[in-house]
Every structure is written in structure tokens, then in C-alpha cells.
Amino acid sequence: MTPPELHDHTRSPRVYLGLIRDWTPPALLAAAAIALWEGLVWMLDVQRWLLPAPSVIVRELVSSGGLLIDHAATTLTEVLLGFALAAAAGILLAAAVASSRLLERSIYPFIIASQTIPYIAIAPLLLVWVGPEITSKVIVVALISFFPIVVNLVDGLRSTDREVVDVLRTLGANRAQLFLKLHVHAAVPYFMSGLKVAAVTSVIGAVVGEWVGAQAGLGWLMKVSGPQFQTPRVFAAIVVLSAIAIILFLVIAGIEKWLLRRYRRNSR
Amino acid sequence: MTVRPRAWRESMTPWTSPPLLDVRGLAKSYPPRRRGEAPLHVLENVNFSVREGEFIAVIGPSGSGKSTLLNVIAGLESPSAGAVAIEGDPQLERLGRIAYMHQQDLLLPWRTVLENGRIGLELQGEAKQEANRKTAALAERFGLTDVLDQRPWQLSGGMRQRAALLRATLPERRVLLLDEPFGALDAITRSALQAWLTSVLDRQKTAVILVTHDVEEAILLSDRVLVLRGQPGAIAAQFHVPLPRPRSQAAAADPPFIALKSALIHSLQAPWQ
Ligand SMILES: Nc1ncnc2c1ncn2[C@@H]1O[C@H](COP(=O)(O)OP(=O)(O)OP(=O)(O)O)[C@@H](O)[C@H]1O
Ligand SMILES: [Mg+2]
């Protein structure tokens, strides 16, 4: 065993080196793309309502900061509520599907079929059913995001080797104990993968919902800014939306890393 | 017909105590994988019994049904015919009453050695503190005290096997099944663990059934060696090991040991239909 102090000493520079190694290539690529974009827009003298240069978008981000933050708050609320709803429904459905063959055969086809529904067509109906407030958007987010959660969790709950199940059975485990002491733990890595996908689809769901009908939110802001030739504002909203999705993704990835530190050999 | 060398016959068993485990007319076949194919007969008419404190070795070629036999005895699979009785009762549920250690360690990667070891006690509803105390106490005899807080993937292969045996034996069952417990280890670690196993087991009153490929291991550890052979597998021969237990590695050089070894190897190689 390595003594802890030695361990810490050798570790911190290595961590920073790792970060530099991981983040340098994408940062350079992004910088190059932005520079190219900026250069082309100025060289070809593209109208800003057609395609604003990155510098114009940044200026828009600063000048409309308050407005963007207000609408981002609405969108973020929808995303978080819908995501939580999707996670709760996903856990319940996955537990049901994994617990019995009969439930699996009766429920699973509908879960898969539900994903073939074009939500852009459902969203206006939701508007009629539950009104123009935030609820309809939360529902669209949940409908889009529960699918990756259920599918991954079902796979995870089934991922345990039969032999490991046999070990616990010979030790006297009943069905409930097998579920709680084995299947649930084995499913954690899969569940976290599902949540990461759902984080991104949640943001898309919120924008779809707002596009169809809303009173606030970044999707709504984009929709009303476009026809007014406020293209820089549309791009600024996209930047904020991407930031929300990326931050959500990173938060979940961080939780995942923390949870899976104990599984190390199994996961990567 | 069963070919039995002159070694030792079941009818000669000194019935000092009733058998702890009794296997009678056991057969196991699997349904055909595809329609129209014949079912796969893995075991047919397997008979033997094990008394308290007795150590049985089952030896046989790969695919002869050794693991299948242990799975049926453990209660993980039901026999196609025949019965397995523990404590004289063929109706008794065997899951949760027989300790079983598989060939691979099958430890749970998210649990430490302590948490893996105590899981059997946990499943019985034992209080956590008490379970931890018992686990730590036995772990000391298993030489695992220093790694109780480590996860399986941090351990060597030999340590993982010991941790798996710790988990299997903690609930103190009267029958212990071992499926090639040292098969995956190098020769040096294996002989160290064989010596260690003799030392920990002889203090217990458990009956042990050890499945192995290794003729020397079988003779070194057991009171009786069963040879499982054929398609479907049946017990082709039984050998009594007339040497006092526990035996040291040096016993392998004794003339009776060598004679027994060649008889066993012969019975494994002899023609058999
Ligand atoms: N669940 C199953 N379904 C169908 N066939 C099986 C099943 N389990 C085992 N078998 C077959 O039964 C036969 C005996 O298998 P078993 O694992 O018991 O052999 P073994 O003696 O333990 O071999 P080894 O020494 O290689 O471990 C093999 O031919 C195997 O393919
Ligand atoms: Mg086997």
C-alpha cells in the first residue's frame, strides 16, 4: 500500500497534466473554428441578421444578459422538473419491467412505441389540455427523456451474471434481497449513462415545448427574435441553451464518477 | 456397469453416524438446444453419501458434469431424477443451507472484502455490527485482516479466492461445496492455499465436497476420491485415502500416496463406455 502523503504528492501534478491533455485539443479546435467564422463574416461582409460574427454574439450575450438569464431560468425550471419526472417514471417503469416477464411483455412494447410519437405534434395538444403555462413544457421534457432512462436501467437491472445471482441464492437470498443487494448496484453504471443522455434530450424537449407555445423561455425567445431579424439574440440563446445542457451533463458525469469510484474495474 | 477397483466400496462404510448429505439415483439432463435434437444427458444414476466431517474429492475430465453435480446438490438446479437429502430429508430446501464456492471468485466489485465476506450474514438478517465482528474474526484466520477495506479488484488472485471462501463459510453451513477453488491459480499459490485449507477446515465439523482436475490435490485433501466419468457422467470408481488428515505436502512422496495416485490416474484413463 502506498502511504497517503506520497500518494497525494505524486498525484496533483499528474491530475493537472491530465486536464491539460484532455482539454487542449477541443479548446484549440473551438478557437480555430470561431476564428474562421469571425474572419469569414468580416471578409465576406455577411449581414448580421443573416449570420452574426462570434464577436457580435458575445456582445449580444453581454447587453441582453438580464433578459437571457430571465428566460434561461424558465427553461431551466422546465428542464429540471421534466428531468426529475422522467427519472422517477423511468425508475418505476424499469423496476416493473425487470421484475416480471409478464409486465415486461405487456409494458415494454409501449415504452418503445412511445418514442416513435412525434412530440412536435403532441406539444400543441398538450397546450390545449393543460394550458400555456410551464406544465405542458415539463410534460414534453419528461416524455422525451424517460426513454433513455428506462432502456438503460432495464439493461442494467438485467446485466448481472447468472453465476453471481447463484452465489447469493446459495447464501439464502430471496427475490427482494437479490434486487436490492445485487441488481440495483449492478445497474448504477447503466442508469448514469441513461441520465447523461436524458440531460441533453431534456434541453431539446424544453425548446420544442416552448417553440410550440409558451410565454417565456429561451425557446420562446428564439422563436420571437428570429422574425424580428434579431439573429444575434437567437444565437445568444443557443449559446445559453448549450451551456445549460453541457453543465447538466457535467454535473451528472461528476456524480457518476463519484458513484463509480468503487466499481473501478467494471467501468473503464 | 460400474467398474470399481479393489480399493474401497460404499457398502464397507463404517456407519458411525447417519449421512449428512445423501445423493440417490441422481440424474440431470438438459432439454435439447434445437428442436429435433436429443436432450443432453449430463449425469445419470449418481449415488454417494457424505458424513459429518468427511472430505470428498470428485475428480473427472472436463465436461463430465462435476459443476452440474454441485449445482444440483446446492439446490440451484433441480435433478431430472433421483434426490438429494440433507440431514436425511430430501424435501428440505437446500438453498441457504449449503455453502458453495464457485471456480471464479464472483466477488461484488462495489463491496469491500469485509462487505463481501459478511453478505451471507447480512442476508440472514444479522445486525451489521455483529456481522462485521464475525467477519473480521474469521478474516484474521484467513489472512485477510489487512485488506478488509479493499475492493476485490485491488487484490491478488489468491486473496480473492480466500475472500470468496470467507464469504461462503461465514454462515457456518454443515456442507461445503468447492468447485475447483484453486484451478485458476499458479502452482505455488495453489499449494500454499491447499496447505492453508487443510489447516482451517480441520477445525470445523463440516462435510466438504471438492471438485478438482488435480489428482494430487484430491489425494492430499480428501478422505475419499470419487471418479466421475462418461457421457452421461456417473461415478466410475471410489478410492479411500488411508492416510491421516491433515496431510502435509511431503505426504505426496509416501509410497501409499504414490500407489493411490497411479491407481487414480489409471482409473481416469481406463477405457469406459
Ligand atoms: N445450463 C445448461 N444447459 C445446457 N447444457 C449445460 C448446462 N450446464 C452445463 N451443461 C452441459 O453439461 C455438461 C457438463 O458441464 P459441467 O460444467 O458440469 O462440466 P464440468 O465437469 O464441470 O467441466 P469442467 O471441468 O470443464 O468445469 C457440458 O457438456 C455442458 O455443456
Ligand atoms: Mg466445472
Image (spheres, coloured by chain):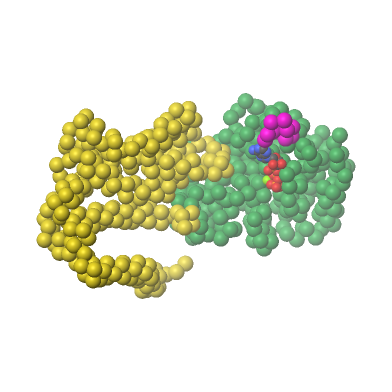
Chain colours: A yellow, B green
- Is residue B100 in the magenta section? no
Q: Which residue occupies 42% across, 36% down?
A: A112
For the residue pair B135 and B110, the one nearer the viewer reads as B110
Q: Which residue occupies 23% across, 55% down?
A: A238
Q: Is residue B143 above or below residue A81?
A: below
Q: Which residue occupies 21% across, 70% down?
A: A42
| Residue that sits furthest to the top in the current view | B91
Q: Main secondary structure of the magenta part?
A: loop
Q: Is residue A157 above or below residue B138?
A: above
> x, y percentage for residue A66?
11, 55
- On the question of residue B263 being in view, the answer is no
Q: Which range of residues does the magenta coloring cover? A: B32-41
Quadrant for ligand 2 reads: top right
For the residue pair B158 and A261, the one nearer the viewer reads as A261
> x, y percentage for residue B196?
63, 56
> x, y percentage for residue A47?
18, 62
> x, y percentage for residue A190?
43, 47
Q: Which residue occupies 59% across, 58% down?
A: B158
Q: Is residue B143 above or below residue B23?
A: below
- On the question of residue A215 being in view, the answer is yes
Taking B88 as reference, is A119 left or right?
left
- Is residue B33 in the magenta section? yes
For the residue pair A226 and A13, the one nearer the viewer reads as A226
Q: Quadrant of residue A247?
A: bottom left
